[in-house]
Image: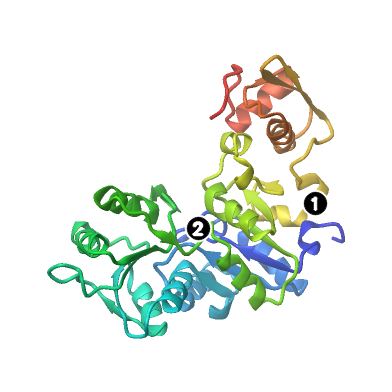
Amino acid sequence: MADALRTAYDAFLLDLDGTVYHGARPIPGAAEAIRRLREQGTPVRFVTNNASKAPGDVAAHLRALDVDAAPDEVSTSAQAAAKLLGDRLPAGSAVLVVGAPALEDEITAAGLKPVREAGDDGGDVAAVVQGHNPATGWADLAEACVAIRAGALWVACNVDTTLPTERGLLPGNGSMVAALRTATGATPEVAGKPEAPLFHTAAASANASRPLAVGDRLDTDIAGAVTAGVDSLCVLTGVATPATLVAAAPAERPTYLGADLGALAEPPGELRIAPQPGWQVRPHGDTLVADGDGTPLALLRTLCAVAWDTGVTALRPGGERATAAFTELGLPTGGEPIR
């Protein structure tokens, strides 16, 4: 399909949790969409903020879900954090790890010494690195607290507050980071998304000059793409919702919007967040009134474009078709502002 979005870019930087899978459950259509990218010869990179698995384990998990993947196609926030610390600390420095064994391995590979205890006063620990690990508990946070209070550099692999799983949204690394913030009054440096290096490294590994980032989170996947200066596609299979898209801050606004990865087969013009044929959205006082006919997603793209342009997020349907589309999108129909 000559006019498909997938033909317009020279690499695709795909988020995983909420975009390709929910934990152990594949998102319908994702494997087929990725297979089509490979058939046309376009490089694929898997860019994940989840620091709990090594690249080889991530690739194996993807293959188990019928997605072809190699370890060197995976870029994780654990790798980004280890590189940051390796660039900042003398070789052999002690780094207290709050996270999974995969994060420990990345710290070792960076020439540093992973430890799990801060000692009596935390003074021997040069840095604390924190990544997602379902097994993290109070004792782990207590060790990190001692080291951070003693002056250790604190690096968070990511600050995603939630993690999309087959059971729904569960606490992410950012929720654990928030606990340490409260306990120490300190703020960590963030190595993964929404910072740009993870995107730049993944694009460089594919020799790409025009990559497209794809993800489900506005505050990490899309914000990271904006920071890195690359176009982005937001999919509605994870965290982002129609309401959060309408109210998105400038730094978190995607180029395109699709239901899922199947959108890569659709024309860019139909996916771009811009006024779409069939729908009219006009200001009426301090409210945007929508009317017309078309698909709900086309209406959402139009609503986002006008809301972003005007700064008005109070929405109201102006007819039966619009009311049905609002209902399908889960948007309020009473004209109240979306925040």
Foreground residue, 92 or 238? 92
Alpha-carbon neighbours of circle 1 within 10 Å: few (<14), some, or many (≥20)? some
Give the residue displayed 73% in from the left and 33% down from the top.
Answer: 309
Q: Name the residue under label 1.
A: 268
Residue at mark 1 to residue at mark 2: CA–CA distance: 24 Å
Q: Name the residue under label 2.
A: 17
Residue 85 point in image, percent of width and height: 41, 74
Alpha-carbon neighbours of circle 2 within 10 Å: few (<14), some, or many (≥20)? many
Residue 28 point in image, percent of width and height: 59, 55
Q: Residue furthest right?
A: 2
Give the residue displayed 25% in from the left and 73% down from the top.
Answer: 125
The N terminus lies in quadrant: bottom right
Name which quarter of the figure residue 112 lies in.
bottom left
Q: Which residue lies furthest to the left in this view?
A: 120
Q: Number of marks in the image?
A: 2
Name the element at disc 2.
loop
